[in-house]
Image (cartoon, rainbow, N blue to C red):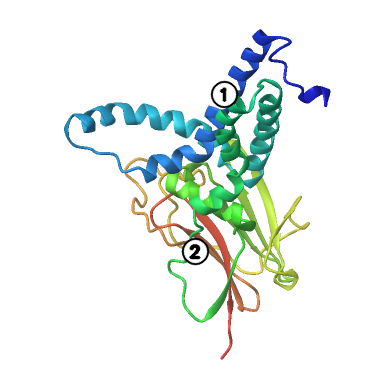
Amino acid sequence: MHYFKPIEEDDPGLAAVLRGIMWLLFVPLLLGIYGGWLFQAIELPMTGIGGRIITLVAPSVYFLVLAPTLLFYTGPISFLVIWCAGLVICTWLWLISQSGWKVRAISLLPLALLLMAPIAVTGMYEPAPLSTPGLRSGGEVAWLTRPRGSLGLAIRRARFELGTYQYDDEFKLHGWSDDGRLYYSSFGPFGRRTLWVYDPAAGERAWRTGSLPEGFQPATEVSQLNLRHPSSRLRQRQPVGRGETSWNPRVIEESVSADGAMRALVINDASVLHYEVVVVRRIDP
């Protein structure tokens, strides 16, 4: 219990410094978790003098909120790592830098908000269903890129509402192998690339793999059906004045299995730079 003994009486100066550090941590941590949601939930007046002030101040405030938010909402793992580290440090500082219940009660609220963050996020950002534009009815859809768990789905929704999809992965199909497995790659920011394999007989989840099988040739051709988003990292650059300029946010790529029973698709959301990989299994009547 020595490490949790308040040091206020023994060294008031050090206690004050530690309290300052605690509050400096609380601000970016809570802004990163709740700031974006509050910024969108509060309906700010946009008329009169108040509206003019908000118009001038809002971009700066939004930047201060967005910077820590981008760290938290990169993905479930980054969220939990940053949250755990922040919670442990803030709890330790809360225990040793203060004495007396009144002083601790003041800083208990931000600590409680930090503690309940993973549960609060799933309530603030309700997961959205898979957008499947251009898919024909009459088949079962396996959503290969679906985030795991309620926290992953909530973070995906948060990225949509915060407009940070430009940091999401894009996907490119390599096609189906002769033994009925689908191979595709994800391309993240800063050149990060991951190869994935999906076996319909093993469930509805894909898993990482090191490389394509030796001598891999797709059983059927991978079809390019539409252009990618104009800001896509994978879109081929066209010479000025040449090539197609339209962008149809529907099915981007398609690969049909050798037996024709399954279609792998890369689909693009109709409004943002966001891609998903789905497999449609044909249901015979």
User: Which residue shows up at 54% across the image and 58% down it?
Assistant: 276
Q: Which mark is residue 128?
A: none
Tell me where residue 118 appears, x and y as whole percent: 61, 47
Q: Is residue 212 left or right of residue 186?
A: right
Tell me where residue 188 appears, x and y as whole percent: 59, 43
Compare residues 46 and 92 and report the one nearer the observer: 92
- The reply to whether callout 2 and callout 1 are in contact (CB within 8 Å) is no
Q: Gap in Å between the C-alphas at discs 2 and 1?
A: 38 Å
Q: Residue furthest bottom?
A: 285
Asked if residue 23 is positioned above or below residue 77 in the image, the reply reads above
Quadrant assignment for the N terminus: top right
Tell me where residue 199 appears, x and y as whole percent: 72, 67
Asked if residue 188 is positioned above or below residue 148 in the image, the reply reads above
Q: Which quadrant of the view contains residue 217?
A: bottom right
Residue identified by numbered label 1: 23
Compare residues 224 and 157 and report the one nearer the observer: 157
Q: Is residue 243 left or right of residue 212?
A: left
Amino acid type, mark 2: Pro
Which numbered disc flags the more N-terminal residue, 2 or 1? Answer: 1
Q: Is residue 157 left or right of residue 12?
A: left
Asked if residue 39 is positioned above or below residue 155 in the image, the reply reads above
Residue identified by numbered label 2: 129
Q: Secondary structure at mark 1?
A: helix
Amino acid type, mark 1: Trp
User: Which residue shows up at 65% across the image and 24% down it?
Assistant: 100
Quadrant assignment for the C terminus: bottom right
Mark 2 vs mark 1: give the one in front: 1
Q: Is residue 34 left or right of residue 94?
A: left
Q: Secondary structure at mark 2?
A: loop
Tell me where residue 233 appears, x and y as whole percent: 50, 43
